[in-house]
Image (spheres, grey):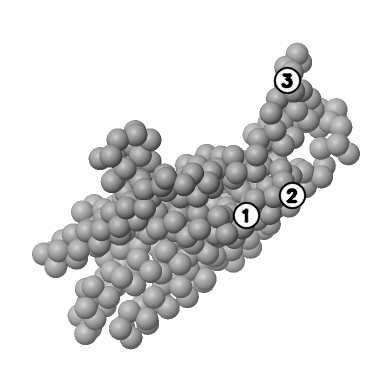
């Protein structure tokens, strides 16, 4: 297990040297504060910078609750443009190692393939969740400041479940990078696959709830405080992550 | 990018400033990080001045694209010093 620890630390140090912690967090903070501010001040923005007269917003419109604003921040911003940037930021996670010959160098040492893959997964998951947590917490702060209070424990539970989805995305990127050589193609395929999973989770059918995107439904239910959630999707998500990893392990062993 | 600068004069600044300020601040911070890194490795990377334009003019996406892609594209020969 010491190999795993050392390799994970290497990943984190490398990310710190590339300022990845700083700029990824900044990006998610910007995404996180933009959505509640735009929702709150839409009429002021339209009045001042719209460039089009005659657009009015119904003054009696219902003010969205803080849960709805948080939900739109996460599913509208973090899960679309945020996910794309996140995947682009770790598209080279195995391909860069392979192209520079670092992979052969590591694997000729007494390091098992499993700890190599697990360290990749762990390192990139920690980086992503560090940035996403900072962005989400700042967004949470702005939302309760502008729209009223919301229970922090629900939000924390949501973040915990969302981190499982990020774990799945990282494992998907690892799996795809064992098939495809070029980093750009890896990014495009991973983005397409994860958006596909986000799309099919919307269908309200038992089979689709078992897809890895089902964990997102569960997480969103924590925000909306729906109580009849399907906690089974945690198990299926973990099963999918393990499946991805073992498949990647098999592929790398063959080559 | 919006190039019509006269619009800026018509905006009711005191009303819009309190919520636009954090976004501008964080954007400037991001651009600052990217520019710092660009300045350190502008002799190393491919076509540095195109990346400078990208960082400064493309809002939010430019610095990120530079930090993800641009800084990895290392020049492998030093024959084209002029670019």
At 23% from the left edge and 73% from the top edge, which residue is drawn? A114
Which chain does the residue under circle 3 lie in?
Answer: A
**Residue A151 numbered tag:** 1
Residue sitting nearer the eye, A210 or B82: A210
> Does label 3 lie on the same chain as label 1?
yes
Find the distance from the CA under tag 2 to the CA under tag 3. Answer: 23 Å
In the image, residue A192 lies at what x, y percent? 34, 41
Image vertical order of residue A219 relative to residue B71, above or below: above
Which chain does the residue under circle 1 lie in?
Answer: A
Which chain does the residue under circle 2 lie in?
Answer: A
Residue A152 visible in the snapshot: yes
Q: How many numbered marks have been drawn onto this rendered protein structure?
A: 3
Q: Which residue is mark 2?
A: A145
In the image, residue A71 lies at what x, y percent? 55, 43
At 30% from the left edge and 83% from the top edge, which residue is drawn? A1
In the image, residue B66 lies at what x, y percent? 52, 53
Q: Which residue is mark 3?
A: A58
Image vertical order of residue A182 relative to residue A7, above or below: above
Q: Secondary structure at mark 1?
A: loop
Residue furthest toward the right? B14
Residue sitting nearer the eye, B71 or A43: A43
Q: Determine which quarter of the picture holds residue A38.
A: top right
Q: Determine which quarter of the picture holds residue A115.
A: bottom left
Q: Residues within 10 Å of mark 2 (few under 14, many from 20)?
A: few
Q: Residues within 10 Å of mark 3 (few under 14, many from 20)?
A: few
Q: Nearer the viewer, mark 1 or mark 3?
A: 1
Residue sitting nearer the eye, A149 or A211: A149
In the image, residue A3 lies at what x, y percent? 31, 83
Q: Determine which quarter of the picture holds residue A44.
A: top right
């Amino acid at each position: 297990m010491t190999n795993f620890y050392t390799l994970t630390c290497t990943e984190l140090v490398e990310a710190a040297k590339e300022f990845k912690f700083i700029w990824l967090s900044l990006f998610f903070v910007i995404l996180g504060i933009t959505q509640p501010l735009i929702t709150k001040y839409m009429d002021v923005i339209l009045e001042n910078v719209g460039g089009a007269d005659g657009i009015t917003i119904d003054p009696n419109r219902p003010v969205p609750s803080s849960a709805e604003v948080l939900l739109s921040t996460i599913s509208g911003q973090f899960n679309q443009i945020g996910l794309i940037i996140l995947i682009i930021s770790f598209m080279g996670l195995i391909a860069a190692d392979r192209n520079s010959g670092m992979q052969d160098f590591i694997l000729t040492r007494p390091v098992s393939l499993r700890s190599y893959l697990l360290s990749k997964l762990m390192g990139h998951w920690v980086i992503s969740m560090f940035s996403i947590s900072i962005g989400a917490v700042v967004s949470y702060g702005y939302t309760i400041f502008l729209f009223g209070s919301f229970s922090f424990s629900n939000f924390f539970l949501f973040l915990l479940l969302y981190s499982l989805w990020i774990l799945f995305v990282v494992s998907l990127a690892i799996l795809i990078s064992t098939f495809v050589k070029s980093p750009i193609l890896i990014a495009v395929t991973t983005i397409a696959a994860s958006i596909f999973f986000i799309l099919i989770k919307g269908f309200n059918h038992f089979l689709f709830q078992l897809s890895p995107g089902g964990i997102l439904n569960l997480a969103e239910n924590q925000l909306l405080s729906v109580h009849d959630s399907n906690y089974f999707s945690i198990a299926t998500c973990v099963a999918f992550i393990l499946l991805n990893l073992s498949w990647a392990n098999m592929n790398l062993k063959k080559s | 990018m919006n190039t019509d600068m006269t619009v800026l004069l018509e905006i009711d600044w005191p009303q819009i400033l309190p919520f636009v300020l954090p976004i501008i601040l964080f954007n400037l911070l991001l651009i600052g990080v990217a520019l710092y890194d660009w300045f350190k490795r502008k002799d190393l990377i491919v076509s540095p001045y195109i990346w400078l334009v990208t960082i400064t003019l493309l809002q939010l996406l430019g610095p990120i694209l530079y930090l993800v892609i641009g800084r990895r594209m290392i020049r492998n020969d030093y024959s084209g010093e002029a670019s």
